[in-house]
Amino acid sequence: MLYTDAAVIGAGVLGCFTARALTELEISVTVIEEKEDVCTGITRANTGIIYTGCDNRPGSRKAAMCVKANREFDQLARGLDVRFSRCGSVMAAFGPRGEDVLRRKYRQGLSNGVPGLRLLSRDELAEAEPLLSRDAVLGLYAPGTGTVEPWELGIAAFENASANGALFRLNEKVIHMERSGSRFILETDRETILARTVINCAGLSADAVREMLRVPAVRIFPTGADYIVLGDSLKGQIRHVIFHEPEEKRKGLTIVPAVDGSILAGPTERSADLAPEGATCAEGLEELRKLCAEVVPDLPLTEQIRTFSALRPNPRSVQRENGRWVPVDHSIRDFLILNEDGLISLIGIKTPGLTCAAELGRFCASLAAGALSGPGRNRHFNPRRTGIPRVHEMKENDRAALIRTDPDFGEIVCQCHDVTAGEIREAIRRGAVTPDGVKRRTGAGMGVCQGCRCISRVQAMLTGMRKNAPQTDSPGHSGTEKPEERHGIY
Amino acid sequence: MEYTDILVIGGGAAGMAAALAASEAGRRVLLCEKEDRPGGILNRCTHRGFGRAFLGRDLTGQEYAGFFAERLYKSAAEVRTGVTVLSLSQDRTALLSGRKGLFRIKFRFCILAAGCLEKTPGSLGIPGTRPAGVLTAGTAQLLENTDGLIAGYRPVILGSGDVGLIMARQFAESGREVVALIEQKDQVGGLLRNRRECLEPYRIPVLLHTAAVEILGRDRITGVRIRDLETGFTRILHCDTLITAAGLIPDRTLCRDLMPAGRLPDWLRLCGNCESIHDIVDSVTREAMALGASLGQEAPRK
Ligand SMILES: Cc1cc2nc3c(=O)[nH]c(=O)nc-3n(C[C@H](O)[C@H](O)[C@H](O)COP(=O)(O)OP(=O)(O)OC[C@H]3O[C@@H](n4cnc5c(N)ncnc54)[C@H](O)[C@@H]3O)c2cc1C
Ligand SMILES: Cc1cc2nc3c(=O)[nH]c(=O)nc-3n(C[C@H](O)[C@H](O)[C@H](O)COP(=O)(O)OP(=O)(O)OC[C@H]3O[C@@H](n4cnc5c(N)ncnc54)[C@H](O)[C@@H]3O)c2cc1C
């Protein structure tokens, strides 16, 4: 039996930031995550855009949080040592419908307090984005839009929360919840956990987790999304995030110049049934290629290095009809945060959930503080985290000095992104247990060869270090891990 | 700053031969190889079929590599293994990284012999899941032939070029069932000799006009949906591994920023698979020797 003041269910970007915000309080914090690593859910597969808030209705929680989060993002990224590129965005309209949308978003952005918005003429648009189709007639420029690697942000919050005392229990799934007096009893597949407040950040399962204690009110109805990633050989050819506003009523194309130099195109909007979880579907990819040909006809799709899919956690109110829970209306538009007697649930947090992760975490922590009747502040809280050195971004002198003190940082393992053995070693020490975990922490295997050349070395380092290293070496880990079984043969 | 007449990047068949020839012409030569020993692709080739033309012997890839590595180490050329060339600059310097440090080196000529990249499953964009067990032929060879691991037991092999054929044989030879070798075109690619030596003795099922259209399986691959491109008919091949041998692309990442006019600077030459994809190592060796020797004539004696 384990006692904790606050239990967080799910270690996606929202669970990690909630945990981080909770460690600012003088309470014990336990995070329970089903998977072998943090940030492998929605946080792993999304568009990675840091939005400005001009897409959200004035007065909504989304608008307020997003504008504030965007304004503070440089500081957040610096403090957590996360790469953040404030590349700006252009939204492009191709006809009267799109123009209306742009003008509406422009006004909406102004009233939300989004700085620097400007409408662009056709020529200005072409100058800003040379690859954009000349059929675009009007643009909306938002200098504040940016992009991050979503998992990098989440992992940074995880490491910082761990350093500040949060206990992360991985490979552990919450399967049952009960209330006993003022406490919650959480049954996991390994342990019974007693908690005074529970923050449900279970992503796509947040509705199911909530329903362990409450009657259904909101359910998640996932839809699917597909993406295409182009390699960094095209670096610099797309300068801003491009939002295409289509004339017909359908999903437009988004193009993102990612921080690692690759280019992301997507997401589609399709039924989740078209492909199993984690799978792309042919129709989706075909649709994307068609959209690219229309919107950015000269973008060479031959440079594709991978495709991936995602699931959107659309929340909808449900009511009982003939013994079944059926949705009553369209997807709930605003962030839905329920506080039911100390059970705090984030349900169906879609865009801009990544942008607002720190805000949402802070908000949940304040609700939790209320449920815990106002705990004191943790005076030792340190908001700063230092990331794994990104050797290829260092100045030559610093890099040479680092190699002199630690030769592992001279040995290149991933040639696509010049990732060294030192960085990989550090990623493993910090909690990577699979090649994928190493990839998300260092970028090794993310480049044009997709790990063909480095996977065997990365796997050998994982096996070697996990055999030799003391378990306590990785921050916040506890319990057994079982990744090798899955990755022993390829 | 250190200086060398000729910097050779890559210690595969091409780099070794170029370095040998240039140093025999009396030049100061430095060869940098990222891995901890020279050989490149050859090091993962445990099959025979190397050196028939150039050496008049039928060696394995590893033996062929050994033959040249031995001569290379005896030559005057300096060999640095575990050293990666990170970048090349117009001022004819290169940035090198290894466990001994980060160095800049100045040179007169540079021979880029960095080999090739494989087309990856990701670049093919086959719809479906992304389970374990989907890998390129090169990765499979690396795992099996140098790391002593098992890539899989019941593979489908995609692509019937030489690489695909050799992979099929590697699996079949060790008693594993190759579910099928699939090929989009209407005939098997690859050299006649490989078709004869790799397919026939093992009765490997070959499906022509066939494309992989979906990858199935959650954690590990369980099957590939294939489409007959003539009839449009699809069906599932059950397997535990998909090996892609879908083509090789010269790896010229290092000179990407050096060709604003689309032309290589005159101090930079390409050879081996980095110049164009070669099926037979003997021609790589021959061409690289000629290049090394001719640059050996051009470079000023120091
Ligand atoms: C397609 C798409 C594109 C998006 N693009 C953007 C964007 O560009 N910008 C932006 O700001 N936002 C974007 N978002 C929104 C943003 O990605 C999400 O709001 C955010 O990632 C949600 O994180 P999460 O922590 O809730 O979910 P997750 O990352 O899924 O985390 C939930 C975790 O809970 C765990 N879990 C579930 N059940 C249990 C259980 N019973 N026990 C233990 N653990 C459990 C899961 O394993 C998982 O790790 C996008 C979303 C989608 C779907
Ligand atoms: C699967 C397969 C089977 C084959 N079978 C046969 C056969 O049976 N018979 C036959 O004759 N031929 C065969 N070949 C063809 C032949 O082996 C190759 O064409 C030849 O070995 C290519 O040599 P290379 O030097 O151009 O490239 P590689 O062998 O790829 O060498 C390139 C080297 O450069 C290094 N390098 C790259 N970038 C850097 C950098 N930045 N810094 C430092 N070092 C770097 C790499 O680590 C590598 O060692 C086969 C090829 C393959 C792929």
Image (cartoon, coloured by chain):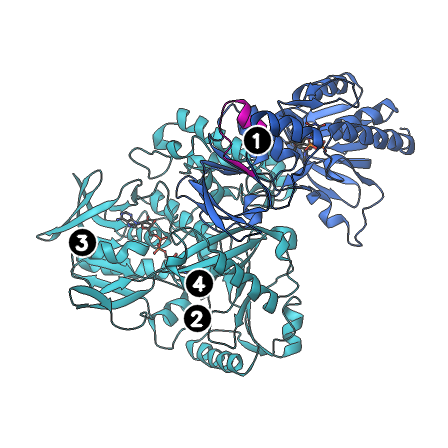
The numbered disc on residue B168 is 1
| Label 3 beta carbon within 8 A of ligand 1 | no
Residue highlighted by disc 4:
A72
The residues colored magenta run B167-181
Residue highlighted by disc 2:
A53
Do the residues indicated by labels 4 and 2 lie within the same chain of the protein? yes
Measure the alpha-carbon separation of dots 3 and 1.
51 Å
In the depicted view, which residue is nearer to us: B202 or A391? Answer: B202
Q: Nearer the viewer, mark 4 or mark 1?
A: 1
**Dot 3 crowding, Cα within 10 Å, few <14, some 14–19, many 20+:** some
Do the residues indicated by labels 4 and 1 lie within the same chain of the protein? no
Q: Is residue A369 visible?
A: no
Residue highlighted by disc 3:
A212
**Of marks 3 and 4, which one's residue comes earlier in the chain?**
4
Measure the alpha-carbon separation of dots 2 and 1.
55 Å
Q: Report the amino acid beneath label 3.
A: Met
Taking the image as shown, residue B102 lies to the left or right of residue A108, namely: right
Q: Is residue A431 visible?
A: yes
Q: Color used for chain B?
A: blue
Q: Report the amino acid beneath label 2.
A: Gly
**Dot 2 crowding, Cα within 10 Å, few <14, some 14–19, many 20+:** many
In the depicted view, which residue is nearer to us: A186 or A133? Answer: A133
Do the residues indicated by labels 3 and 4 lie within the same chain of the protein? yes
Do the residues indicated by labels 2 and 3 lie within the same chain of the protein? yes
Q: Quadrant of ligand 2?
A: top right
In the depicted view, which residue is nearer to us: A453 or A256? Answer: A453
